Image (cartoon, rainbow, N blue to C red):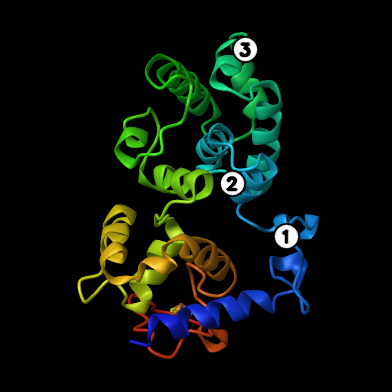
Amino acid sequence: MTGWKTIMKALESWRKNLPPSQGGDGAGGQAKGDPNLGAADPSVTTIAERYKQAPWAVLVSTIISLRTKDEVTLVSSRRLLERSPSPESLLALPDGEVERLIYPAGFYRTKAANLRKIAAVLLERYDGQVPADMDTLLALPGVGRKTANLVLIEAFDMDGICVDTHVHRISNRQGWLGEAGSKSPDETEAILRRVLPRKYWKGINSLLVLYGQRICRPISPYCSRCVIACGCARRGVERSR
Ligand code: SF4
């Protein structure tokens, strides 16, 4: 397998050379805060920057983002956070208002119910604060490992590996997860925590999400254009372009 440093450099350089409208830095790079930069960023990162890494805003947008398109997450999160910038204010909203504000996010009814339960738990047990601890986050309603990792990374600048469908698929195809591979994102996270140097944990999600959307696509990946093809085991790839 190619070394991690080479892989990460290749992915970073690929992203940097994308035009800004496609999520890249553009030829000369862009200043942080440039509105173009956020346009194709994962929505939670964009919300985190907008709300200055406020843990409540990050947690809310992370819950909304599950199974939801980035554009919808951005609009729904902003609409809800304008009315409920804290757990107290969310609980004070009238019945049905959270659902209405986050619609059309996927599973908006379930998410609204979970957000209300989470707000109540935070007020009851944590003085209204979002805990910076994996196990405590996992005990909150509707919070799985992907959500907990993203909150720790974006809100608390802690090390974590956020494994979504793209990270899971590309890690398996590349052969990073060993001969047996991994059958679930949680298993992928556990293996990556062992094999991936810690300094790459936080950044791997945003690199691979964009790469999985553009190059290593779920069906028929563009292996002929791939910048990390050298050393890729192409495990499970039956058809490519
Ligand atoms: S070579 Fe193909 S399967 Fe391997 S990472 Fe690149 S696009 Fe994905």
- Where does residue 161 sit, x and y in percent of width and height? 39, 57
Q: Which residue is under mark 2? A: 44
Q: Is residue 80 left or right of residue 114?
A: right
The type of residue carrying mark 1 is Lys
> In x, y percent, where is residue 66?
50, 42
In this view, the mark in front (1 or 2): 1
Residue at figure coordinates x 66%, y 47% from the top left: 49
Residue 93 circle label:
3
* 137 horizontally vs 89: left or right: left
Q: What residue type is labelled 2?
A: Val
| Circle nearer the N terminus (3, 1) | 1
220 is higher (above) or lower (below) than 113 = below
Whether residue 171 sits left or right of residue 69 in the image: it is left
- Judged left or right of residue 21, residue 173 is left
Residue under pointer 1: 32
Q: Do the residues labelled 1 and 2 touch (CB within 8 Å)?
A: no
N-terminal of the two: label 2 or label 3?
2
The residue that appears at 60% across and 71% down in the rendered structure is 214
**Crowd band around label 1 with a 10 angstrom C-alpha radius: few (<14), some (14–19), many (20+):** few
Viewer-closest of 108 and 81: 81
Of 32 and 13, which appears nearest the observer? 32
Q: Quadrant of the C terminus?
A: bottom right
What residue is at 71 percent from the left and 55 percent from the top?
38
Tell me what residue is drawn at x 61 percent, y 44 percent: 48
Residue nearest the observer in this picture, 239 or 58: 58
| Neighbour tally class for label 3: few under 14, some 14-19, many 20 plus, Cα within 10 Å | few
Check the image and report above or below for 59 versus 200. above
- Mark 1 / mark 2, whichever is N-terminal: 1
Q: Classify the position of the N terminus by image quarter.
A: bottom left
Which amino acid type corresponds to the residue marked 3 in the rendered image? Leu
